[in-house]
Amino acid sequence: MTAPQGEDRQGMTRQERDRLIAQYAGGYDEVVRALEGFPARDLTAHPIAGKWSAAEIVHHLADSESVSAARLRKLLVEDHAVIQGYDEAAWAVRLRYNERELAPALAAFRAARETTAQILPGLTDADWGREGWHTASGRYSAETWLGIYAVHAHNHAAQIRRLRDALKA
């Protein structure tokens, strides 16, 4: 995921950051709840034209969360970090998201979230303001990162629920 063009997330209040940190920490569980009752035979189905399957979403989350964990660490450690964008759709195809088992992807997603969630409460105001450059969207701070990834898993959980609903229709 990339930061929206022109969005400047610096200057969040501590309360806003704390709310987003809590939301981030709950992302894995939200996805697991969305997958509850999803028919295993339909995990690779595309009931909504042009949208990823539930399996593709889970594999995307595993890869995206691994990338996002590295992005935050780069921002916190490197001065003027360069955050590389990537083609998510190409990853889904080239890494055969719809042909792989989900359990390892869920484990990778969970591990990336849990290890990153350990870092967040200890960050200082200066840490949150650390800024780098995203190759696709420009200025990118730790607060930008939090604004994006706090909602990332929740948005994909909602997509999984829409897929399940479309399968019932």
Image (cartoon, grey):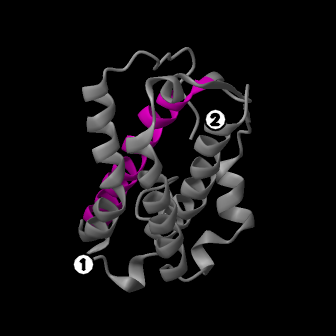
Q: For the point 24% across and 78% down, which residue is it? A: 37
Query: Residue 9: x and y, percent?
Result: 45, 20
Quarter of the image for the N terminus: give it: top right
Q: For the point 58% across and 35% down, which residue is it? A: 2
Quarter of the image for the C terminus: give it: bottom left
Dot 2: element: helix
In terms of secondary structure, what is the magenta stretch mainly? Answer: helix
The residue lying toward the viewer, choosing from 97 and 110, is 110
- The magenta-colored residue range is 140-165
Identify which amino acid the numbered label 1 is placed on. Gly
Identify which amino acid the numbered label 2 is placed on. Leu
Q: As displayed, is residue 12 above or below residue 76? A: above
Determine the CA span between mark 2 and mark 1: 38 Å
Query: Residue 141: x and y, percent?
Result: 57, 26
Q: For the point 36% across and 20% down, which residue is it? A: 12
Relative side of 73 to 51, left or right: right
Per the image, the residue denoted by label 1 is 37
Dot 1: element: loop
